[in-house]
Amino acid sequence: MVVGSGVLFAVNGTVAKLVLHAGLHASQLTLVRATGAAAALFALSLALRPGPRRLALTSRQLPLLIGYGLTGFFAVPMLYFVAISRLPVGIGLLFEYTAPLFVALWARFVQRRRVRGRLWVGLGLSLAGLACVVEIWGGPRLDGVGVLAGFAAAILLAAYYLLGAKGIEDRDVLSLTTWAFGVAAAAGLLIRVVGTALGAGGGAGVAGPAGLASSLLAPGGDWQPLAGTAKGVPVVLLCAYVVLLGSVAPYLLVAAALRHLPATSVGIVGMIEPVIAAAVAWLTLGAGEALNAAQLAGGTLVLAGVALAETARTAPPDAPAPLPAPDALLGGPSTESDRD
């Protein structure tokens, strides 16, 4: 189940990039994904016992649900879409895959939890790997907005893990994720309205934070690309993949897998995703997705470092049940069995 979800996640990166290249903007694809996944999960929540009662809310739960949905289910995928529209899919995933490092550092320095010494080895390996990926010695330069979007996605994904640790104390995983997708859909609609009002998008070529901001706010535009094709496949079918096979199905596979495997094991096995994603993108999209020897070596170091970080935290006696990742475009499942 973990391998299956990893394959679906990995293919989803290439599918999403095809949709973006067809003319749909990152904010539009985020809205399509969130709205479609929310509708599917709301239907599933209502169909399964205990039915509508599963989705009951209290005013105390609203702030966390809003923050949880805005970070992991709206901002993270939209930043990821921006990253892969400007970077090879495999590199975009590698930047985002550093999220467990931020979680472990938060546990050590903010929550004052005990961590194993391997965390520092993992951090060093990941930093060295990222230096190879961006070829810091002066090789070909990666797009600055894409790199910034990838790192921002990693930080917000770490925030999602931390918020999810709180949310899972009061709600089951299905209802928590359903409401989070609902929040993401509402945020996507709001972004479309704001983007239309501001006429944003003209600074898409600007580097740095200003360029990233302009890449996130698209003008209203139209949805004409949905009627087109990419690589001979109708764009609307590609969007359906993003929603059903790139979000809902992998999420359910991960949730089921966590009944049989420790979450840390699920997280480490899920690291097949960036490897498969890079290969699928190269085979489908061509030479522009290929990684050179230094970047391949750097990716290996990043994944090794993340694996060490995944197992560096120690579990408190009352650790809650593990929580799957929010997004089929990210690095697989949350590894919160040793959640701090």
Image: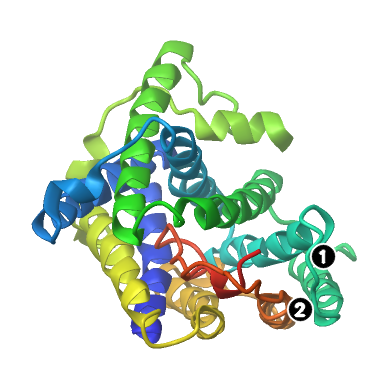
Q: Position of residue 255 (x, y in %)?
A: 35, 72
Disc 2 packing (10 Å; few <14; some 14–19; many ≥20): some
In-front residue for pair 116/159: 116
Q: Position of residue 171 (x, y in %)?
A: 37, 53
Residue contact between numbered discs 1 and 2, judged by CB atoms under 8 Å: yes
Q: Which mark is residue 294?
A: 2
- The image quadrant of residue 133 is bottom right
Disc 1 packing (10 Å; few <14; some 14–19; many ≥20): few
Q: Residue at x 52, y 67 (%)?
A: 334
Q: Earlier in the sequence, mark 1 or mark 2?
A: 1
In this view, the residue farthest toward the right is: 137
Residue type at the position of mark 2 = Ala
Question: In this rendering, is residue 90 above or below 156?
Answer: below
Q: Residue at x 86, y 63 (%)?
A: 136
Residue type at the position of mark 1 = Gly
The reply, left or right, for residue 312 in relation to residue 334 is right
Q: Which mark is residue 251?
A: none
In-front residue for pair 167/9: 167
- The number of numbered discs placed on residues in the rendered structure image is 2
In this view, the residue farthest toward the top is: 197
Q: Residue at x 40, y 79 (%)?
A: 258
Spatial separation of the CA atoms under disc 1 and disc 2? 10 Å
Question: Circle 2 sits in a helix, a strand or a loop, which is it?
Answer: helix
Q: Position of residue 282 (x, y in %)?
A: 48, 74
In this view, the residue farthest toward the left is: 47
